[in-house]
Amino acid sequence: RTVYVNGEYLPEERATVSIFDRGFLFADAVYEVTSVLGGKLIDFDGHAARLDRSLGELGMSMPMEAEALRDVHHRLVAENGIEDGLIYLQVTRGAADRDFAFPEAGTAQTVVLFTQSKPGLADSPAAKMGLKVISIPDARWGRRDIKTVQLLYPSMGKMMAKAAGADDAWMVEDGHVTEGTSNNAYIVTGRKIVTRQLGQEILHGITRAAVLRMAREAQMEVEERSFTIEEAQAADEAFITSASSFVTPVVEIDGAKVGDGTPGKIAARLREIYLEESKRTAS
Ligand code: PMP
């Protein structure tokens, strides 16, 4: 696999980053994951805009123009022959002698990109079967709207789900669901799609924005507010969204079936609409 590190395209075995990199020592870094379908990028502009925002919130800037970044994505897709898969991008504050204070302005940032081939990404078994989730406390820091690489707690959450025989975990704060470990969470009650309002408590999903727009365009009712696990268990449907899972139904929450315990119609329809439009506008 060819990867990108600071302006160079290299075989992955030869790609290196300093042990003093602040991404490694302090998780002082942000990332993005963009999906690739049919060799094209899904919503690159959305991911580039969020990257810019994440960097800005941490006092970093993007060391590369959006167009140059798009070119890197395209070159990696081409060189690695990616049909369906993901592109991971990470930008760190760079390498400097270890110190909590940020290094002086002008320290070269680190930019790394690599691809992951995922044949059949858009027809995963989870889309047909639905996911089982458990609820866990949300023990992350308070700025979840910034897409940092501090992913230890979400990793632990996935392991807790696995240990409980489930697929994922929904995190709960003050009695209300924030989001999944790596996705945004939704329920459908009546014909209304309910998902948590934006704020610092959740990541502003690029897929979330697209799916809510498409739902409204299809005359579906959308309400942005928080909900409890009890409300979700009693809902007609539940689902998640993310760049890598698109729209995926949730059929069980803490052992209780959602609806009749099979993937819901609205989730299925939204997945269809989302994939159709995303593939059509992919670049
Ligand atoms: N929330 C969290 C915590 C995530 O890690 C992700 C995936 N990056 C999402 C939501 C979904 O965001 P997106 O639709 O942009 O992939």
Image (cartoon, rainbow, N blue to C red):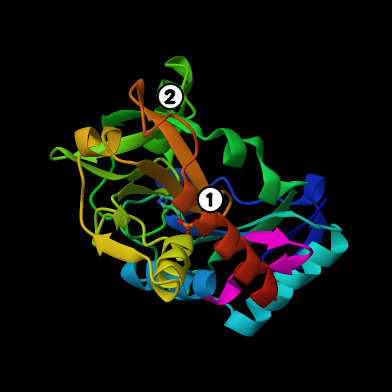
71 lies above or below 51:
below
Q: Position of residue 101 (x, y in %)?
A: 30, 58
Q: Position of residue 102 (x, y in %)?
A: 35, 61
Query: Quick check: is 36 in the magenta stretch?
Result: yes
**Image quadrant in which the C terminus is located:** bottom right
Q: Is residue 45 left or right of residue 50?
A: right
- The structure residue drawn at horizontal position 33% and vertical position 47%, both measured from the top left corner, is 187
Q: Say which of marks 2 and 1 sits in front.
A: 1
Amino acid type, label 2 = Ala
Q: Which mark is residue 225?
A: none
- The structure residue drawn at horizontal position 41% and vertical position 30%, both measured from the top left corner, is 260
| Residue pointed to by mark 2 | 161
Q: Which SS class for mark 1?
A: helix
Query: Quick check: is 158 in the magenta stretch?
Result: no
Amino acid type, label 1 = Ala
Q: Residues within 10 Å of mark 2 (few under 14, many from 20)?
A: many
| Residue pointed to by mark 1 | 268
Q: Is residue 36 visible?
A: yes
Cα distance in 3D space between marks 2 and 1 = 24 Å
Q: Is residue 278 left or right of residue 109?
A: right
Q: Is residue 34 left or right of residue 283?
A: left
Q: Position of residue 133 (x, y in %)?
A: 40, 30
* Residue placed most toward the observer, 281 or 82: 281
- The structure residue drawn at horizontal position 70% and vertical position 55%, both measured from the top left corner, is 114
Q: Say whether disc 2 or disc 1 marks the residue closer to the N-terminus.
A: 2
* Residue placed most toward the observer, 78 or 131: 131
213 lies above or below 82:
below
Query: Magenta part of the protein: which range?
Result: 35-45
